[in-house]
Amino acid sequence: MSTISRFRQYLLLEKSLSAKTAEAYLHDVGLLDNFLGEKRLESADIGDLKNFTKYLQSEKQVEPTSQARIVSGIRAFYRFLVLEGSIDSNPALLLDAPKLGKHLPTVLSVPEIESILNAVDLSTPEGHRNRAILEVLYGCGLRVSELIGLRLSCLHFEEGYIRVIGKGDKERIVPIGQTAQKAVLLYTNGQRKKLKIKKECGDIVFLNRRGGQLSRVMVFLMIKELAEHAGITKEISPHTFRHSFATHLVEGGADLRAVQEMLGHESITTTEIYTHLDREYIQSTIALFHPRY
């Protein structure tokens, strides 16, 4: 069995990586192999690896995020070679990945959210539906896929929560406030009952005018149009309401673990980005109001 075949087996069986991730790692090693030419992978040293990363950056003009992923694959490969005894020392130990700046998501202020909500024309057939969608996105911090898949049977308003099916079909319980509840009931008891609902969508909360399930694109376009009407110039999407939900909770002093549970994040480190946003908010507040800052 070749070294690459053994590496693939190691990734799939011992590291339990998905087939897609394993193939990405194998592709990265293939790039290095082509770069080295006649020199064997097992013979490469740190100089070769650094030249490879420079080649990716200068000649191939690979984006920093892709460079970082390739470096991760190369590191995994040389850890494997050390583990199986093919080489004595790991030349990738000192191989640096490009520094990636933290990308902080766009967040709406409370007045901006209110202006978008007020931009909804409640006299139109879709008005109360669109208002309810915004209230649920912001009030519960849902992903757009979770919103369009939300079911009537998952609404437990008397107990004050909804049941959400998130990534990987994982279920979580999310509190829902009175404002969002009222908006949803105005829609489900009103305009929704006037629709000719498709059989397979009978339990879906938010429907299009033909009685079918909304698409992600429809929600995106609706929010973009409302933001324009409200005079919001920020680049926003349905996910912006999720970011705003979490940020406003953290700014208000909510426990990070509670926010993690409500968002359905597997790792607390994913939720911690909102502490960075909170620090930026605090710093900007001091800069704006402190006389000697």
Image: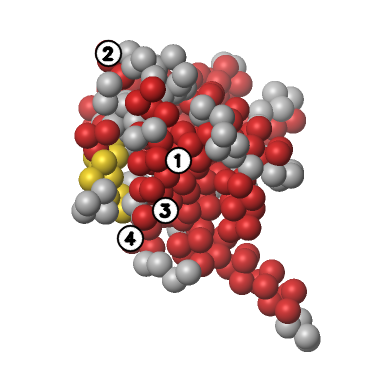
Q: Nearer the viewer, residue 222 or 265?
A: 222
Q: Which amino acid, by three-letter code, is at mark 3?
A: Thr
Residue at 47% x, 64% y is 250
Q: Nearer the viewer, mark 4 or mark 3?
A: 3
Q: Which residue is mark 1?
A: 132
2 or 3: tag closer to the N-terminus: 3
Q: Earlier in the sequence, mark 2 or mark 1?
A: 1
Q: Which mark is residue 258?
A: 4
39 in relation to 52, above or below: above
Q: Amino acid at mark 4?
A: Ala
Picture quarter with the C terminus: bottom right
Mark drawn on residue 179? 3
Number of the label disc, if any, that sits on residue 215: none
Answer left or right for 115 relative to 206. Answer: right
Residue at position x 35%, y 34% from top? 188
Quarter of the figure that contains the N terminus: top left
The CA distance from mark 3 to mark 1 is: 9 Å
Asked whether the beta carbons under mark 2 and mark 3 sit within 8 Å of each other, the answer is no
Look at the picture and state if 185 lies above or below 22. below
Can residue 81 be seen in this snapshot?
no
Between the C-alphas of marks 4 and 3, the distance is: 21 Å
At label 1, the amino acid type is Ala
Sequence-wise, which precedes: disc 3 or disc 1? 1
Question: Alpha-carbon neighbours of circle 2 within 10 Å: few (<14), some, or many (≥20)?
Answer: few
Residue pictured at 38% horizontal, 27% vertical: 192
**Distance between the Cα atoms at labels 2 and 1?**
23 Å
Q: CA distance from mark 4 to mark 2?
A: 37 Å
Looking at the image, which residue is at 36% across and 55% down? Answer: 177
Residue placed under numbered mark 2 in the picture: 199
Task: Specify whether 151 is left or right of 136.
Answer: left
Residue 231 on image: x %, y %: 74, 44
Who comes first in sequence, dot 4 or dot 2?
A: 2
